[in-house]
Image (tube, grey):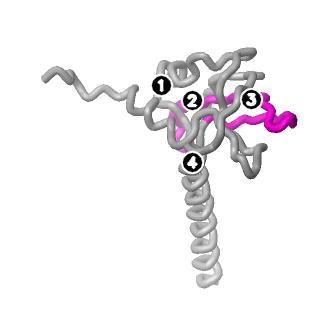
């Protein structure tokens, strides 16, 4: 029984690492994907609680775009768009992303149904911009 549980935990950890690695690879590749215009169908900030009961905010977006005459609907904000640390930060991240607006999105040229609003690992800039490290004029 102990070997089974250990094996299951190792297997589960392996799957988690593989998914995380794949997502990082896609994020890296997305910086070189072609760009096209998309129309925002829906955009909102969704609140909830994490596993520890802390408030968390995350972006939810749906957009429509065309590649080579074929229409697609995407919903990926960024490859690491988990949660934001404050409502103000989430609002900043969603600036200009409102239903009906036209925005650039990036799509995988080999699989155009795979798209993202912010390529690479863009969320880091929103997180960092919301942290104050004191006066920088020292």
Please name the residue that numbered disc 2 is placed on.
57
Dot placed on the residue nearer the N-terminal end, 1 or 3: 3
Q: Nearer the viewer, mark 1 or mark 4?
A: 4
The secondary structure type at the circle numbered 3 is strand
Kindly report the distance in space between the C-alpha atoms of the residues bearing marks 2 and 4.
21 Å
Residue sitting at x 62%, y 73%:
11
Give yes or no for contact between labels 1 and 2 (Cβ–Cβ under 8 Å). yes
Which residues are drawn in magenta? Answer: 50-77
Please name the residue that numbered disc 3 is placed on.
62
What mark, if any, has residue 27 been given in the picture?
4
The secondary structure type at the circle numbered 1 is loop
68 with respect to 128 (left or right): right
Q: Position of residue 133 (x, y in %)?
A: 26, 29
Q: Does residue 48 belong to the magenta stretch?
A: no
Which quarter of the picture shows residue 13? bottom right
Please name the residue that numbered disc 1 is placed on.
86
How crowded pointer 1 is (Cα within 10 Å; few <14, some 14-19, many 20+) is rated as: some
Kindly report the distance in space between the C-alpha atoms of the residues bearing marks 3 and 4.
19 Å
Dot placed on the residue nearer the N-terminal end, 2 or 4: 4
5 with respect to 88 (left or right): right
Residue sitting at x 59%, y 31%:
58
Q: Nearer the viewer, mark 3 or mark 4?
A: 4
* Along the viewing direction, whichever of 58 and 122 lies nearer the viewer: 122
Q: Nearer the viewer, mark 2 or mark 4?
A: 4
């Amino acid at each position: 029984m102990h070997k089974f549980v250990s094996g299951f935990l190792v297997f589960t950890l392996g799957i988690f690492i593989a998914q995380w690695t794949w997502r990082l690879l896609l994020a890296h590749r997305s910086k070189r994907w072609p760009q096209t215009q998309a129309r925002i169908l829906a955009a909102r900030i969704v609140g909830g609680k994490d596993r520890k009961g802390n408030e968390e905010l995350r972006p939810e977006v749906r957009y429509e775009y065309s590649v080579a005459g074929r229409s697609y609907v995407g919903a990926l904000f960024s490859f690491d768009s988990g949660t934001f640390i404050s409502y103000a930060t989430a609002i900043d991240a969603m600036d200009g992303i409102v239903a009906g607006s036209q925005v650039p999105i990036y799509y995988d040229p080999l699989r155009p149904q795979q798209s993202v609003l912010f390529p690479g690992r863009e969320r880091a800039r929103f997180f960092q911009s919301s942290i104050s490290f004191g006066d920088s004029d020292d």
